[in-house]
Each structure stands twice: as C-alpha cells, then as structure tokens.
Amino acid sequence: MRDFRIYWLGMLISLIGTWIQAVALNWLVFQLTNSVFLLGVVGFLSSIPIFLLSLFGGVVADRMNKRNILLFTQSSFMVLAFILAFLTQIKLITPLQIMFIAVINGIVMAFDAPSRQAVVVELAGKEYLFNAIALSSVAFNASRIIGPALAGILVAGMGMSGCFYINGISFLAVIIALLLIKTNDGIRKDYKHAMVADLIAGLRLIKDNRVILILITMVGITSLFGISYVILMPIFANDILKVGVKGLGMLMSAAGIGALIAGLLLARLGDFKYKGKLLILSSLIFSFSLVLFSLSKVYLFSLFTLIFIGWGSVIAIALINTILQTMVNDEFRGRVMSVFMFTFAGIFPFGNLLAGVLSHFFGVSTTVMLCGIVLSAFFIIINILYPDIRNI
C-alpha cells in the first residue's frame, strides 16, 4: 500500500488545485458572458471529447503502462492550466479561448480517466480494492470541500489568474508521486487485434452481463440528469440565494462535505454485504435532495440539501465503481472502466447542454427540480424491475 499512499497524497493536492480552478473558471465565464447558456456550452465542450474518445482511452490503458499514460496526461493538464492563467493575467482571455482550452482539456481527460480508475487495483491490490476506491473518493471529495472554499477566498485576494496558476503548480504533486511509484499492470503482449476489435470485445462483455449493463445505465442516467446542477451553481449563488462568489464556494463545499462523509463511511465499512441495497437507497436520497435544493430560497437550507446530494451521489458512484472492478478480469479492466467513465463523464456534456438550454427557457430552479424528479422515477423503476441489483 506504500505506492497507493504516495499516489493518493499527490492526487489529493492536485485535485484541490483542480477544484480551485473549476470554481474560478465558472465565475470567469459568467463574468465575461453573463450567460447561463454559455456556462452550459463550456461544460459541454470540456466533456464532449470524453464521449468521443474515452472508449479508446480504455483500450490504450489495457495495452500500455498506466503510470506512463498518467505522467503524460497530468503534465498536459499542468501546461493547459498555465496557459489559461497567463491569458487571464494579461487580460486577453476570451470566451472562445476558454472553449478551445476546454476541448483540449477534455481530450486529455479521455485518456487520463480510464488509466486513473484502473491503476488503483494495481497499486492497492484486489484485497484492498474496496478500501482503495473509498479512499480515492475521500481524496476527491475532500478536495471538493477545500478547493471551492479556497477559491472563494483566492478569487477575491489573487484574482482568477492566481487560481489558475495554483492549479498548474498543484499538478507537480501528482507528477512527483507517479515518478516515485511502480506499477505491475501486466501489460498485454498480444497486439494482433486492432484497437477497434479490442473495443468491441469489451463492449460485448458488458452487453452479455445484465448486472454490469444495468449499473452502467444507472451511471449514464445520473450523469445526464443529476450532475449538471454543478454548472448552474453560480446562478443559484448570484441570482437566487444572493450570496456572491464566497457563498458559491460554500455551496460547492457543502456538497463536498456530504461526499467526504460518504467516502469515509465506505472506507470504514470495507467489503460489506448488501451493497445493492445501499446503492438504491443512496441513489434515491440523491435524487430527492436535488428536488429539495431546487425549491430552496434559503441559503442555510440549500447548504443542508447539498450535503445529502454529495453524500448520495458519492455512495452510489463509488459502489458502482467497486462492483464493476470486482466483476471483471484484469485483461478487460481498462475497457470496462472506460465505459464507466464514458457514461459518467462522457454523457455529462449532454447533461450540461440540456441544463443550459432548459435553464435559459424555464430557469435554473425548475430545471434542477425536473432532473431530480426524472432521476427519482428512474431509480424507483430499477428497484422494482431489477431485484438482482438489490441483492449484490
């Protein structure tokens, strides 16, 4: 577990920087454009390459050393952050440039995410897989608390360019960690099959296993209707709750607190029974909380509902991640996790775009409420029609 601990610490520092940039970038786009629709467009462009390329990213992860892939992708993220910081500092940044950087960032992410998901089992071992995934969730969600809270302070004190520079520097932590660890990923020696053939083999594996297929579908529906509330948060903070950029940081951190509690709970539980029942319960809590958040006009109540949104979403996604990784052989791990990321992050841009369009016509509160209702209905149907999921 030594290598996993080093990797975990480096990733935590890097993720804090990423969340600082995410909050600052949303605020920058909103200041430059004052447009809900363009917030959705930027979110769409940052994620659409994942939809188009992440499946091939999984094939690459199964063929190559995952540490080397991550060294390249994390270094690329660092360069992009510095470019964004410099353009913002000299006041030449435009919405078009932000969109271009978002696309390049998404292309890199398409190859980064499958390897980042699949490398965990190589660093921690299968016997500690559940705990490792839970701890990875803790790192991600601790950063969701620390990053946005710092962003609210740093935007006011250093400006948005300072936030982007901090993010660029933070990538050094994970790059150094990757240089210090070793992976034993059983690199495939057989390259007789074309990448498309390998991809098709992975998709066939998923299609033929009903449980895996349903879990992947749950991730996709959640991504389409449940996660886009994040890009609408500046409007909730500015126009509905009227708490400004510092309030925005606290709203983002509230969801992170719930998510952190979820990660710590899963790490404490370990490899427990009745994962399926907890999966359904957490999914329903997440969707119901979205509806409550959409109806709130009170800042403190909004913070309260966001804690449950963060808790429910992380429990559900972490459980699905773990179940998938324990159900597949090492040979297919990268491809299955690429499909996981495809349905999570790849469908996410369509959720962002849908949220932007609906918010333009109906307002952000109505949009989030409708998404929460759709998700609630979907999870109830899954619970009724597919009892196999409850019994995992």
Image: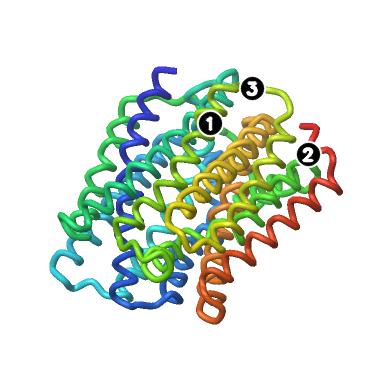
The kind of residue tagged 3 is: Asp
Left or right: 153 in relation to 265 = left
Q: Residues within 10 Å of mark 1 (few under 14, many from 20)?
A: many
Query: Which residue is painted at 58% across and 47% down in the image?
Result: 338
Query: Is residue 114 something one can see in this rendering?
Result: yes
> In front here: 226 or 245?
245
Say if 213 sits above or below 24 in the image: above
Query: Which residue is painted at 25% across and 61% down in the image?
Result: 84
**Spatial separation of the CA atoms under disc 1 and disc 3:** 11 Å
Q: Which residue is mark 2?
A: 389
Counting residues from the start of the chain, the first of labels 2 and 1 encountered is: 1
Q: Residues within 10 Å of mark 3 (few under 14, many from 20)?
A: some
- Image position, residue 125 (x, y; %): 54, 21
**Spatial separation of the CA atoms under disc 2 and disc 1:** 20 Å
The kind of residue tagged 2 is: Ile
Query: Which residue is painted at 54% across and 68% down in the image?
Result: 365
Point out the image quarter for the C terminus: top right
> Secondary structure under badge 3?
loop
- Image position, residue 147 (x, y; %): 32, 46
The kind of residue tagged 1 is: Ile
Left or right: 361 in relation to 176 = right
Point out the image quarter for the N terminus: top left
Asked which quadrant contains residue 36, the reply is bottom left
- Image position, residue 35 (x, y; %): 39, 77
Say if 329 sits above or below 18 in the image: above
Q: Which residue is mark 3?
A: 271
Query: Is residue 52 something one can see in this rendering?
Result: no
Instruction: Check contact, mark 1 vs mark 3: CB within 8 A.
Output: no
Q: Which residue is mark 1?
A: 133
> Secondary structure under badge 1?
helix
